[in-house]
Image: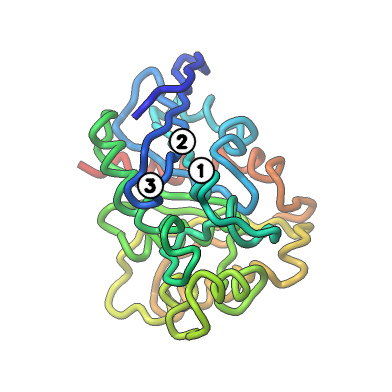
Amino acid sequence: MKKLASHGCHGGTLSYYSHASTSTKCDMRFTVYMPPKPTGAALIFLSGLTCTEENFTTKAGAYARASELGLIIIAPDTSPRGDNVPDDASISLGKGAGFYLDATQAPWNTHYNMYTYISAELPKLLRENFPIRCFGLFGHSMGGHGALTIAQKHPDLFQSVSAFAPVSRPSQDGWGPAAFTAYLGSDTTTWNDYDATALMSRHTGPATLPQILIDQGLDDGAYKEGRLNPEAFAAACKSVGQPVNLRFHPGYDHGYFFIQTFINDHLHHHAAILETIK
């Protein structure tokens, strides 16, 4: 792991790192905000389509409140990168569009293993290098999809979860079907493993996650076009007894001004849950 840059920020330190990933078979980048008095609770933020580790880091306005709460925040890139990594002209496929899944179809399956990267490799690397005792997971749009799916599969690792304007039913809506066909093939039954609503619908037994927080802007073009569909996810949660707080906000779109406005609510949501974790 290489430290590329470091900056003082709200009494703590914001640093950029890169490392050679075994999951994606390329160098991956991420940022870490280390507050002045870390509690050991760490949040991983998953960004959306076309983003890198830079978008959340410079636009979300998260670090002042993270400093107050003692939260470590990690922002990884959204996909593999490099000259040998396949790409596509579409914003929903290739670089910047990893969809937080493990691809099974050529040419994507060599590098596009973001599910394994986020759920296994990155947390292990972070624990080895930083004073982390527990993780929460949150994200935006495509990254909201990643947060909701990965947290469901790994509730013992990611013990709190939230999302901004998540792609909630990608096997049926928005950018999901085209990307899933390319990455996973034409057998749609395999898509449900990476669909937050489908995963929640088939859950049996008591809820394994604490309350999930979701914020959605009502002036969001992607929401108006039916690409996000948080209502379907909330209905699936209700059907299996999973607590969810889905909030709608007039006047807010799909961008980072929306995230800036409600980021503190999400940080408090995670801090309240993770402070009880030993």
Residue type at mark 1: give it.
Asp
- Does residue 19 appear left or right of residue 197 in this picture? left
Q: Secondary structure at mark 2?
A: strand
Circles 3 and 2: CB distance less than 8 Å?
no
Q: Left or right of 30: which side holds 232? A: right
What residue is shown with label 1? 77
**Dot 1, crowdedness within 10 Å: few (<14), some or many (≥20)?**
many
Structural distance between the alpha carbons of marks 2 and 1:
6 Å
Amino acid type, residue under disc 2 in the picture: Phe
Q: Is 89 drawn above or below residue 191 in the view shown?
A: above
Mark earlier in primary sequence (3, 2): 2
Mark earlier in primary sequence (3, 1): 1
Q: Residue at x 41, y 59 (%)?
A: 110
SS under mark 3: strand
Observer able to see residue 220: yes
- Residue ID for mark 3: 136
Q: Write down the residue under mark 2.
A: 30
Q: Residue at x 45, y 85 (%)?
A: 189
Q: CA distance from mark 3 to mark 2?
A: 16 Å
> Would residue 99 be found to the left or right of residue 276 on screen?
right
**At 75% from the left edge and 51% from the top edge, which residue is drawn?**
252
Asked if the residue under mark 1 is in contact with the one under mark 2, i.e. CB atoms within 8 Å, the reply is yes
Amino acid type, label 3? Gly
Closer to viewer: mark 3 or mark 1 = 1
